[in-house]
Image (cartoon, grey):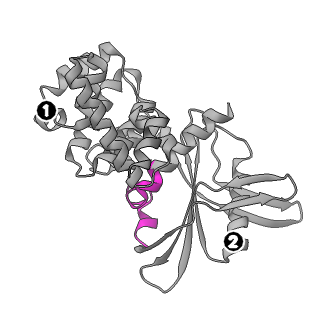
């Protein structure tokens, strides 16, 4: 159970961390507007130990940056949450306290909820009948409450990836992937980042064979059909799922290794590269040694 939780949060961490600026632009424009992104300093490896519980906590995404309009430094802490926890609001305050105790700088806390349950809080309070001690607030993004159609006109890569976790019906699954592919065809990003987005999307919205056939029928009718079919990821899926000639399969494997190399150059974790390329861990480690 813990491994599954960690895997999902890790996937969210990699997508949001890789496309940090784009994430804030599309989901938290008010935060995006005040940050000077030229001054971003990642603090994502911050680890704190709870001396009482003896529990080591690694904060998911923590960056430091200056503001555009004034000479001030802030910290942005983003915490993806893939399962419902009734004490999560208290945990957000705990993380906030640890960060503030260490850096003594203003902090913008953000929680990203990706689970189905309806539980959600954006506040932690502490009070007595005679005295109000504390009112701690944090920004939230509840993906299941977002309408995927509101984001398909965007060429934002993180919005494309997160379409797979937004609110859609079973009947809309094929249409969601069509719009995702149309978004991918508009973007100009390197193969490693492209594969990261595609791998994330496929983790949460993977069509069955019948749905894929319907998808291809619909794609061929689109004005963007040529651009979509030229996507390296489209060829890869066709090569793997349709099991065509060995020569093409060999080319697919080579393409996957090239993508893995690009991801290694971007210093993405090997676990993520395994997830999105489906290569064996030892093959990726061999590629890393040859870099």
Q: Position of residue 157 (x, y in %)?
A: 33, 49
Residue at (66% x, 75% y) in the render? 103
Residue 164 vs residue 151, the one in the foreground = 164
**Residue 225, numbered circle:** 1
Horizontally, residue 3 falls left or right of residue 184, namely: right
At x 64% / y 34%, what residue is drawn? 3
Residue nearest the observer in this picture, 41 or 217: 41
Extreme residue toward the bottom, this view: 71
Is 20 part of what is drawn in magenta? yes
Q: Give the crowd class for mark 2: few <14, some 14-19, many >=20 residues within 10 Å.
A: some
Q: Which residue is mark 2?
A: 100
Task: Tally the numbered discs.
Answer: 2
Q: Nearer the viewer, residue 23 or 241?
A: 241
Relative to 270, does residue 250 appear above or below in the rendering? above
Q: Callout 1: 10 Å neighbours few (<14), some, many (20+)?
A: some
Is 257 magenta? The answer is: no
Q: Nearer the viewer, residue 158 or 199?
A: 199
- Magenta segment, which residues? 15-35
Q: Secondary structure at mark 2?
A: helix
């Amino acid at each position: 159970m813990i491994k599954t939780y960690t895997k999902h949060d890790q996937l969210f961490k990699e997508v949001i961390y890789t496309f940090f600026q784009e994430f804030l632009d599309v989901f938290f424009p008010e935060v995006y507007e005040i940050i000077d992104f030229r001054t971003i300093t990642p603090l994502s490896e911050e680890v704190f130990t709870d001396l009482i519980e003896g529990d080591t906590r690694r904060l998911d995404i923590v960056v430091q940056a200056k503001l555009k309009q004034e000479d001030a430094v802030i910290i942005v802490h983003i915490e993806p949450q893939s399962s419902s926890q009734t004490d999560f609001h208290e945990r957000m305050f705990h993380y906030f306290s640890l960060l503030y105790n260490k850096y003594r700088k203003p902090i913008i806390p953000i929680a990203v909820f990706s689970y189905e349950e309806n539980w959600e809080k954006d506040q932690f309070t502490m009070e007595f009948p005679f005295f109000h001690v504390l009112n701690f607030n944090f920004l939230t993004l509840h993906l299941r409450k977002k309408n995927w159609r509101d984001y398909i006109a965007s060429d934002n890569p993180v919005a494309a990836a997160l379409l797979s976790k937004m609110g859609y019906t079973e009947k809309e699954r094929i249409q969601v992937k069509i719009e995702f592919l149309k978004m991918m065809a508009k973007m100009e990003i390197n193969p490693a980042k492209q594969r990261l987005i595609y791998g994330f999307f496929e983790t949460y919205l993977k069509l069955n064979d019948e749905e894929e056939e319907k998808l291809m029928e619909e794609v061929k009718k689109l004005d963007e059909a040529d651009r979509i079919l030229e996507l390296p990821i489209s060829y890869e899926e066709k090569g793997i799922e349709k099991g065509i000639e060995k020569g093409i399969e060999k080319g697919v494997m080579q393409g996957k290794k090239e993508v893995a190399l690009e991801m290694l150059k971007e210093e993405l974790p090997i676990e993520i590269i395994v997830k999105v390329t489906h290569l064996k861990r030892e093959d990726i480690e061999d590629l890393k040694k040859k870099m």
